[in-house]
Amino acid sequence: MNREFIEALEDLEKEKHISKDVLIEAIESALVSAYKKNYGTSQNVRVDIDRETGDISVLMKKDVVEEVYDDMIEMSLEEAQEIDPRYEIGDAIEFQVTPRDFGRIAAQTAKQVVVQRIREAERGMVFDDFVTRQGEIVTGVVQRKSGDTMFINMGKAEGILPANEQVPGEFYDVNDRLKVYIMDVKKTTKGPQVFLSRSHPGLVKRLFELEVPEIQDGTVEIKSIAREAGSRTKMAVWTEDENIDPVGACVGSRGSRVQSIVDELHGEKIDIITWSEDPEELISNVLSPAKVDKVIVSETERTATVVVPDYQLSLAIGKEGQNVRLAAKVSGWKIDIKSCTQYDEIMAKAEQEDDDDLTIYDEGAAAEAENSETEIFDADAAETAEATEAEIAEPEAEETEETEEADEPEIVETAAEEEVTEGEEQ
C-alpha cells in the first residue's frame, strides 16, 4: 500500500461516483478477515490504512489483567509495564503486529474487495436510478431472446420483457429499437431486475405526455385511461382552462400528435374523450363513437342504463363488447346498454305489471268495502225496523179500540130493534 493506491482510489471515486472512504473501510474490513484467516480467528485486531500515504498497519488490542486466561486478548500487568510503566489493570493496550509478508496479502485482498465493491456500488446506483424511473418510458435495443421473453439493453441495465407484457401481433428481432414502459424494479444478488411492458396503459399515457406539451405542463390532465393492447385505447382528458380544447390538444393539427402515437403502437386505435363530473354526460362521452339517447344512473349501486337508437346498439357495444367494456373501465360505472325498442318493451311490461297490481288491489279494497257496508246497513236496518214496528204497532192499537167502540152501538141497536120487532108481533 502506498500513495499510488490512494490516487487510484481517488480516480475511481471520480469515475464511478463511489466514495474513497467507503472503499477504504471495505478494504480494512476485508484485511481483518484475511489476517484472522491466516493468523488465528480469536485475535482482537484491526487494520488501519493511512488516507494520505496508503500505509497499512495491523493493530492488536489486549486488556491488562491480573491473571491471564487467554493470551490472545489479555496481557499481564508485568508485560504491560514493560511496554509502558504507566499501564494499570483494566487498561487496554494496542500495538502493531503487521506481518512481514502482509503487503502481498493486502494487495491481493484489496484488489478483490475494490472490484467487488465497485460492482455492488454500480448495481446499487443502477437500482436507485431505475427505481425512481418506475412508471416512465425508456428506449432500448433487443439484445437477445429466450423463448417468448425478450431482454432489452437499456445502457446501464438489462430489462426483461415477458411474453404476457408484449402486444399481440408485435414481433421484434435482435437489435431492433423500441420504447418500453418500466413496470417494476427488483433488487437481486445478481443486480437489479427491471421488468418492462409494451401492453401497460401507462405506456400510452407517457407517450401522450411526451408528445403533447399541454399534458406535460399540466394544462391538460389525463383523468382516466383504459387499454386493450394492440386493439383499442380509451382516454378521458380534462382542463380547467376554458380557452383550451383538451381533445383537440391531444389530437393535434390534422391529427399529427395522435398519429405519431398510433404509429408507435403499430396502428392501435385511440379514442380521446372529454371528462365530466356529471355521470350522465361522462357515460355518454365514453361510449363514443356511439350516440346515446338517454342515461339512467343509480348513484348507490354505481350502475347506469344507457338507451341508444336501434341502429347504434352494435356500435355502442362494440366488437365482442370491447367498446362498452373499455367505457366501463374509463368511467368507473357499470354500464347496461339497451336499444330504444328494448327499453320501450321493458317500460311497457313494467307499466302492465303496475296496472295488474293496482287492479288486484282495487278488487280487494272493493270487497272489503262491500263487507263493511253490509255490516253497517244491517245494523241501521235493524234499528230502523224496530222503530218502524213500534210506530206501526201503536196506531193499530188505537184503531182497534175505536173500531170496538164503534161496533158496540151498532150491536146494541140491533138487539133493541129485535126486541121491538118481537113486541110488535106479539
Image: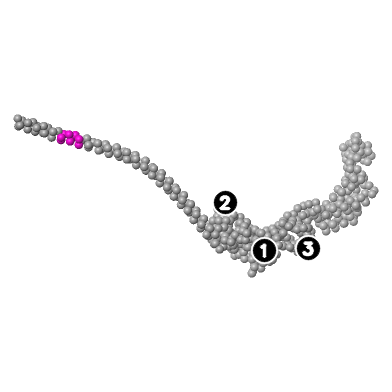
Expressed as whole percent of the image width and height from the top left, the position of residue 368 reads 41, 44
Quadrant position of the C terminus in the picture: top left
Pointer 1 residue: 268
Residue 142, x across and y down, in percent: 77, 61
**How much space separates mark 2 and mark 3, taking CA atoms?**
51 Å
Q: Is label 2 in contact with label 3 (beta carbons under 8 Å)? A: no
- Residue placed farthest to the front in the image? 425
Magenta stretch bounds: 399-407
Asked whether 411 or 125 is in front, the reply is 411
Instruction: Identify the mark nearer the N-term, 2 or 3.
Output: 3
| Residue 174: image tag | 3
Kindly identify the residue that appears in the image at 56 percent across and 52 percent down. 299
Nearest to N terminus: mark 3 or mark 1: 3
Q: Is residue 6 left or right of residue 346?
A: right
Q: Is-magenta flag for residue 124?
A: no
Seen in the picture, residue 318 relative to 110 is either above or below; the reply is: below
Front residue (pair 64, 56): 56
Horizontal side of 284 relative to 106 (left or right) equals left
Q: Secondary structure at mark 3?
A: loop
Q: Can you say whether 195 is above or below 45 in the image?
A: below
Which x, y percent locates residue 13?
83, 56
- Type of amino acid under label 3: Val
Looking at the image, is 248 positioned above or below residue 72?
below
Q: Nearer the viewer, mark 2 or mark 3?
A: 3
Res 251 quadrant in image: bottom right
- Going from the N terminus, do you reach mark 1 or mark 2 first? 1
Q: Residue at x 59, y 60 (%)?
A: 317
Q: Amino acid at mark 2?
A: Glu
Residue at image coords 5%, 31%: 425
The residue that label 2 is drawn on is 301
